[in-house]
Amino acid sequence: MTTKSCWYKGGSIYLLLWLMARVATAQIAPDAQKRYNAAVKLLQAGNYERAKTDLNAIILQRGPLAPYASYYYALAAFRQKNISQARLMLLQLMEVFTDWRKMDEARYLLAASYMELGQYEEALKVSQLISDSGLLTQLPKLEQNFIPRITDLDRLKKLNKAYPSNRTIGLALIDLIQRKSSDKDDLELSDQLTNRFGVPGLATATTQPTPSTAGAPNRPSMPARTNRPKGYYNVAVMFPFRLDGFENDKRGRSNRYAYDLYTGIKMAKAKLQEEGITVNLFAYDLDNDPNKALEVVNSPAFAQTDLIIGPLYVEPNRIASAYANQNGILLLNPMATSSELVMNQPMSYLAQPSLNQQAWKAAAQANNLGGSRKVAIYFGTSRKDSLLAQAYLDEVRQQRYQVVDFRKVTGNAQSIADAMVLTAPGSKTLPISTTTPAAPISLGHIFFASSNENDGARLLDALSRRKVNAPLIATASSFDFYRNSANTFNRRDLYLVYPDFIDASREPVVEFEEQYLEKRHTIPSVFASEGYDMMLFFGRQLARNGLQPGNHASLRSDTDDYLLSGFDYTQSNENQVVPIVKYEDGRLVKIN
């Protein structure tokens, strides 16, 4: 059974809207209608097993909702890839509710189930009973997805004899004869079919036309994919472009990062083309709207997707991730740092190292420092700061460090210094503004997590006021590299956890910046560089191994032409590359 069986889903969302409206007009008890609506919402959300349980209770009541519940039960089973169960429920529906007005929908889903089971003859018999004009236009796409998989020449010839006007069967038979047979009669049959149906060919891929608004991606128009070799890869970019309010000269808008990411992705597409890897980009303007996300993934065109980048919001991402898992499509989270997004999600990856990975790498650096096993942990005011600090706390506790202070710090250097508790047990700690505090504990190191670029210098000042000389491991985001002087980074043994580190002196970085400046008339942001790297890496991986779940052995960057520090997924779906940098000889240098 194939993993990409989503040619059907495009009709399901429209059917859902029709059914909900249709059922609402029937004389149904409010409680029953409420249970039905809730069950359908569970199906929409991907909670198929729970939806089936609730739908089954409605089926057993044999009321006016029963045929609709039967259909949705079968659809839930189908999406679970329990095709036999879906087939049995549909056959029961057809037997019990013979006069159901939407029986063509059930017939189409039954045909799809037979196709998935390889019972092509049964599928074609059922499809002959369909009269709905909308579904009839979908049938060729269904057939194109399955019929070319038949490798038994005699079986395909029998199907052609039974359905001589079916173009999909005719083209598949031409292709199979040309590849497998040298028999004179077969070749004559191939010529006859060619004269009737034409020559089988690859689906023509459409690439993005020039945007009508400068800098803004067009809405997609994707071709249906037939059975073809992997000559190109379709990438769906699901970002909050907000095209309706797009103003190209409004450079300070809040979603500028989405356009920068996309520009980097497009530049990587050009680089991949030079390497013989064709990537077609299809941009979807998707904000924080789960209904829009559901509509996108259920569209027939989306079935041709090989890689999803985004969405960036939680609920749309959850829907896209469920779709990706069901259909064996890789989903890449370009900015997220939460391990939960890839936990038990075999097809979802983090382009950025998670907070857990950052904490682990920082703790490994602390181990390299040696010295005391005592540590103080401080963090800023954002949720990300506290989450990283907690992850670090958990990590060093596992490594049997003694945590002598763990707290949020805010304000100026003085208030931060006053808040620190760094004295031996039993010593009285007084604010530094009123008296000289007791001698501080001898620390092995301090860890500081902050997303405020002013906090790093303040913490350094606070530590100096408290006469704490231990090494500091801090997030790079806590420093302003343009405003802070070199003296700021030379004041103590300072190590920076810097996932977005870019060495501006490297040749690939210089070349990218020149190309970007020529194209966009501005220097690239870090988001543009990240978009470039992720598309370059995953485009190469698609061409090499198709990114099958569980196949991590070679899933790491093996060239040095990435702008940041590369990728490593050999251990998990989280990027394990976390640069640690240090200020040396007037510049930041990656030491690990």
Image (cartoon, rainbow, N blue to C red):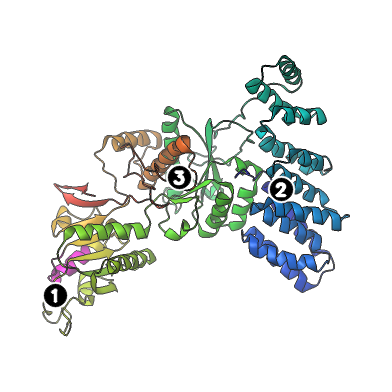
Residue 246 painted magenta: no
Residue 97 visible in the current orientation? no
Residue 28 visible in the current orientation? yes
| Viewer-closest of 335 and 566 | 566
**Left or right, residue 399 beside residue 238:** left
Residue 328, x across and y down, in percent: 55, 46
| Viewer-closest of 316 and 225 | 225
Residue position for label 3: 551
**Prevailing secondary structure class for the magenta stretch in the rendered image:** helix
- Mark linked to residue 11: 2
Packing grade of label 3 (10 A; few <14, some 14-19, many >=20) is: few
Secondary element type, mark 3: loop
Q: Earlier in the sequence, mark 3 or mark 1?
A: 1
Secondary element type, mark 1: loop
Residue at image location 23% in from the left, 70% down from the top: 376
Task: Work out how far the residue at label 2 is from the one at label 3, CA to CA, in angstroms.
Answer: 33 Å
Secondary element type, mark 2: helix
Residue position for label 1: 440
